[in-house]
Image (tube, rainbow, N blue to C red):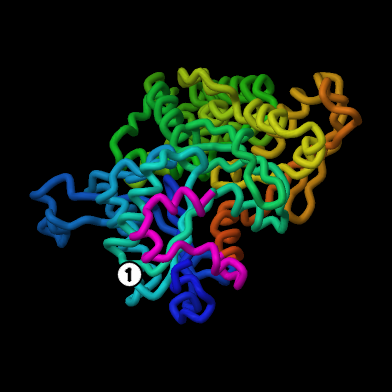
Amino acid sequence: MSSSLQGDDPIMYNQPIVIDNGSGVIKAGFAGEDKPACYCSSIVGRPKYSKVMAGGLSEDDNYVGNRAQMNRGLLKLNYPISKGIVRDWDDMEMVWKHVLNSELNVSNIEDHPILLTEAPLNPKTNREKAGEILFEKFNVPALYLSIQAVLSLYASGRTTGCVLDSGDGVTHVVPVYEGFSLLSSIKRIDIGGRDITEYLSMLLRRSGYGLTSSSEMEIVRNIKERLCYVSTNLTRDEEDARIEYSSRRNEVLNSKSSTAGNTAFLSKSSTKGSNSSTLPNIYEDYRLPDGKILSIGTERFKSCEILFRPDIIGLESEGIHEMLNNSILKTDIELRPILYQNIILSGGTTTLRNFGDRLLKETKFLVNGPSSSSSYTTKSGTASEASAMKDANMTSQTKIKIFAPPERKFSTWIGGSILANLSSFKKMWISKNDYLENPDILHIKCL
């Protein structure tokens, strides 16, 4: 073992840095902290129009993270990570440099080990390139790469459970037993929050709202985060939307100030009739930066349906509820009851309203059949419960519990912070000397 991994090496006592490398948002901070000090977009922006740059933006400037978001109207935006895989390493290096130097104010990165997260089932080349950049360009003393879902489980205080992690680019299910992921049971689908954003953009175009450029897609993303939700009863929500639309349309037609040409614009501000308070509450207004108001209706919940029905966007893949159930069914029969009772949600996409309710409903249907009964309870760290009928391969009745921790948007980073701060974890670090001797050690030690 290299001397850099021994307990008497002073470098290993410096505070490690934890970087949760998300497709949409990067979370970073020092191990041992309760929450990440840095939460910024994994995005790089470059000026689109050279003549506009006279106001202070240089044509050669690159804008990273939140600064790129602030100037998005003048920039062409690029996400270096897509579907959990780094596609643009130059921009990825730029994002890391921004996070370490500007966000965390680290001046001596060569003294801090880094724990970097990654999605499961990523290509080996992705891990190798990350190691090459961090060791050879950033000169970090030690590195460790960990699967995001395992860290999320640690953050929940468990070492055994089944994690459903849905981020911006990818959704995966990882059964974990005593801290080790069960590789043969991991399921992954390349659908996440960004796909919901893109599908929402298409639905809005059908409604006459053209938001397609890279900067406009950030507006659509904001609409998704503020207004979209997962429907627990699609038929009811569609009927409520039809009733509300018809009623508001009639109000506009009957208004003396309206004309036939503006009936497509049904904002709440234009329909304040006496019966508005009794209408279903499907339609919501969104004000664009230029002051124009969009009225968002069925798009709010239809955009999220792709999580449960990927075929809507042309993907031949199982929905997240099927993926969850099939992943558990691939584990040992004696382990399944434990996993069904310890399903942990993680990632920003799982914070969509009603996500846990719908997942419970669909999973319960798969496990129990349509006639099963259940109860749903919300407590601190929301828990959803259902009685599961006997599965063909299960010997007794089981319960399904889905836990949605309030901090699940940060749970991967929190788990990494806990792990990297343990004194017993020092032996897991891969030193730079070990890496230079054998780069394949990244695949040997980082399981």
Image side of residue 384 versus residue 103, left or right? right
Please, what is the dominant secondary structure of the magenta stretch?
Answer: helix
- Type of amino acid at the residue the image marks with label 1: Asn
Q: Is residue 224 above or below residue 317?
A: below
Task: State yes or no: residue 429 in magenta.
Answer: yes
Residue in the image at 48% along x and 66% along y: 1
Indicate the quadrant where residue 329 lies. Answer: top right
Residue in the image at 30% along x and 65% along y: 138
Residue in the image at 69% along x and 22% along y: 236
Q: Is residue 52 above or below residue 426?
A: above
**Front residue of this view, candidates 277 and 216:** 216
Q: Is residue 60 above or below residue 390?
A: below
x, y percentage for residue 364?
Answer: 77, 28
x, y percentage for residue 278?
Answer: 69, 32
Highlighted magenta segment, given as a residue range: 420-447
Image side of residue 151 versus residue 88, left or right? right
x, y percentage for residue 105?
Answer: 36, 74
x, y percentage for residue 386?
Answer: 83, 35
Local crowd size for mark 1, using a 10 Å CA cut-off: few (<14), some (14–19), many (≥20): some
Helix, strand or loop at disc 1? helix
Res. 363 visible in picture: yes
Labels in figure, total: 1
Res. 247 visible in picture: no
The residue to which callout 1 is attached is 101
Task: State yes or no: residue 20 in magenta.
Answer: no
